Amino acid sequence: MGVPTLGCTCAVCTSADPHDRRLRPSALVRWNGPENGGPERVVVIDTGPDFREQALRAGLMRVDAVLYTHAHADHILGMDDLRPLSFAAFRESGPIPLYASPETAEVLRHVYDYTFSPQATYSHRARVQLEPLGDRTRVHGVEFLRVPVLHGEMEIAGFRFGNAAYLTDVSAIPEESFGLLEGLEHLVLSALRHKPHPSHATVEQALGWARRIGSRHTWFTHIAHELGHEETNRTLPDGVRLAYDGQSVPVTL
Ligand SMILES: [Zn+2]
Ligand SMILES: [Zn+2]
């Protein structure tokens, strides 16, 4: 829902700590080509309703691909804001590929009918193209592994890239997925609050998985207004912290 949460005056929603202001979750993976002096490459994971604001803050000048975890509103409703970047991408190499599962692609086609319909006539629609999300997606030489996780009843996608992984909206991690999460330096994992929720992990569940996965650093994301940044961080073990908007960590791809 974002923090502050609409209509709420709780301590976290009214906190003066900038870490307590949370836009909807997404991730940006940015690297330079093989020789490091090569062109900048950018993969975005999810384009939520705050995508435009996040892209401005991150100084985003291009997008090479988008990977979608699932099609809930907080993960897809900023897709249309890819438009200006997609016009530039289109001139350079073609439409921006949006990698999505069949279920996610179906919702995207429905929500953005004016973009994806074969009858679409809106001339300034985003230059984007839905592509099937397989087990491995390569973007300019970097491989993104799909890591299946459960979000309530629904199987959704997490991603492993290099020594990092991004798993949001997790309520359970299937046994087979743990094998894809070995040797991590940075794990981004959702932890909503302390009170149980049918489709999101509590802090306690997320801590259990973090311990088992054993990443050097675990960053909690998709955090609700029940968790104050400083106050919660004081209770977390070494190596586990709440992530915050705009946070950046170095990853080896
Ligand atoms: Zn609140
Ligand atoms: Zn979500």
Image (cartoon, grey):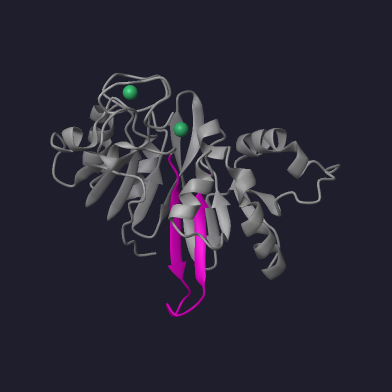
Q: Is residue 251 on the magenta stretch?
A: no
Residue at the (71%, 54%) spot, across then down: 127
Whether 63 is drawn above or below 54: the answer is: below
Q: Position of residue 235 (x, y in %)?
A: 14, 34
Question: Residue 4 versus residue 49: which sits nearer the camera?
Answer: 4
Tally the numbered discs: 0
Residue at the (22%, 42%) spot, across then down: 241
Residue 120 appears left or right of 234:
right
Q: Is residue 44 on the magenta stretch?
A: yes
Q: Position of residue 116 (x, y in %)?
A: 75, 43
Residue at the (48%, 74%) spot, across then down: 33
When asked about the image quadrant of residue 228, the answer is top left
Q: Position of residue 210 (x, y in %)?
A: 25, 40
| One can see residue 72 in this view | no
Whether 40 is drawn above or below 102: the answer is: below
Report the span colored magenta. Answer: 25-46
Question: Residue 18 versus residue 237: which sits nearer the camera?
Answer: 18
Question: Residue 240 versus residue 161: which sits nearer the camera?
Answer: 240
Whether 150 is drawn above or below 92: the answer is: above
When asked about the image quadrant of residue 22, the answer is top left
Q: Position of residue 13 (x, y in %)?
A: 32, 28
| One can see residue 30 in this view | yes
Q: Tell me the quarter of the image containing the C terminus.
A: bottom left
Q: Tell me the quarter of the image containing the N terminus.
A: top left
Residue 99 appears left or right of 178:
right
